[in-house]
Image (spheres, rainbow, N blue to C red):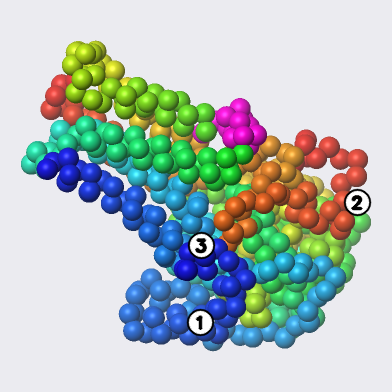
Amino acid sequence: MNRFITYSLSLFPIFFIFYQSIYNDEIINPYSYLIISSGYIAMSMIIIVLSVPLLFYIKNYIDRRSLGIITFLITLLHFFLYLTDNDLNFSSISSDIVSRNFIQAGYVALILFIPLFMTSSNKAQKKLGTKWFALHRLIYLILVLSLLHYYLIIKADYFLFNTYVFIILSILLIKKRIYKI
Amino acid sequence: MKIFNKYNLDKENKVTDERHFNNRRKIMASTLAFPFLMNSNILSASQKKLSFNKDLDYSTNEQTNTIKQITSYNNFYELGTGKRDPMLNASKLKSDDWKLTIDGLVENPFTLDSEDLIKKFQLEERIYRLRCVEAWSMVVPWIGFELRSLINLAKPLHNAKYVSFESILDKENLPGQKRNILNWPYKEGLRMDEAINPLTMIAVGLYGKVLPNQNGSPVRLIVPWKYGFKSIKSIVRISFVDHQPTCTWNEQAPNEYGFYSNVNPYVNHPRWSQKRERRIGEFGKRDTLLFNGYSKFVNNLYTGMDLEKNF
């Protein structure tokens, strides 16, 4: 049941932006809208996953691991949208890897995310034991890299970025106080 | 199917001509009265019509983008940094009683007011491609006059080597200028030979009417072979100077935005590949052309120059 609630709630934003990009004629550049929004959604999802332990009553209805899997899938979607935006053109994608810092940060974040996704089953968790928790601490590094990825693409207006940083720092601070980590 | 309509410029233009489009917005606004729609300048169907000739020498015969695309997807940081912000905040730009000052190294400095801008020069419609540095492009039917006819009136002195442009500064009303996003006011510049090139245009209108605020009302520059940010909006001052003038984006990030900023698919940009572009309304991307396809008019301006160094 919790898994069902988690999936349906967290996939809603993705359905929403696809619906918008097709049916809302106020959106003039739908492709760019999809890429940018999916990026914001992915990063917000990481923040939500990290703050689940703080949501005292709601957390009983959230399957945190499903939430993590969805976050990875949205990140993957963001990546595929980027690839298709480049018409899957190998030379433009490879020149991005070589010469664009924000793309590099994005790739590293995505690659680090893969082992977390691969080890999200109960079986893998049992097998890894305490190492599992250490491995899944990588999400903090992924979050930092995502922020870097975002920071490097900003041209001039850092307002929304600063808001994200402020929210993330507040959440980490509260977690530190409660869990003394 | 709706999805196909959306990506088909031809169909879209046939379906929504501007009159119906404006009417539709009016009906919507009056029945629903969304405050954000009421604000938007897109509603002012009563905007003044201009009389003009149609240019055939420099205009492209490509399909033009719709008025809606041109007026609701803008970069005009004075009115906000989101693409829709300039439309939503359009009414915050006070473009009545405009004064455009022409000064600096000229024999004849003068000032143009709102009336002069649309009456003093013979207006013509020019359909130009516009290529944004963010790798999207549009085709826009501007109305205006060649910058060189204004320069001829001013009679620049021999030592006037560059032309510098300055946008409106109004921290009280312009939402974007309430924060130091850029070093306000917005400034741009051209070399004198670029400024007197017949392609270089001062625009005062769009689709037969005076410019909507979000498109740089009441007077803006159009330099079609350079990235869009060179085409400065809502100009209050044009000065003739003997040194390369300050340009806002160049000042913000000199390694990204050069003084020339010619559209050039061969010069790598740290943010966006400039090799390809998405024409707004199209699904796939198309190749970007050197000088945005205006090579035959501007090639001679840059002979002997290393365009990778002077990007």
Farthest residue in the front direction? B1
* Three-letter code, disc 3: Ile
Circle 1: residue type:
Asn
Vertical placement of A102 versus B97: above or below? above
The quarter of the displayed image where residue B61 is located: bottom right
Residue B120 makes an appearance in the image: no
Q: Do discs 1 and 2 share a chain? A: yes
Q: Measure the C-alpha gap from mark 1 to mark 2.
A: 43 Å
Q: Which residue is mark 3?
A: A28
Q: Which residue is mark 2?
A: B300
Q: Which chain letter goes with mark 3?
A: A
Identify the residue at horizontal 40%, vertical 74% (top origin). Answer: B37
B213 sits to left or right of B127: left
- In magenta, the rendered stretch is A90-102
**Front residue of B112 and A79:** A79
**Separation of residues labelled 2 and 3 (CA atoms):** 36 Å
User: Quick one: SS at disc 2?
Assistant: helix
Residue A37 showing in the rendered view: yes
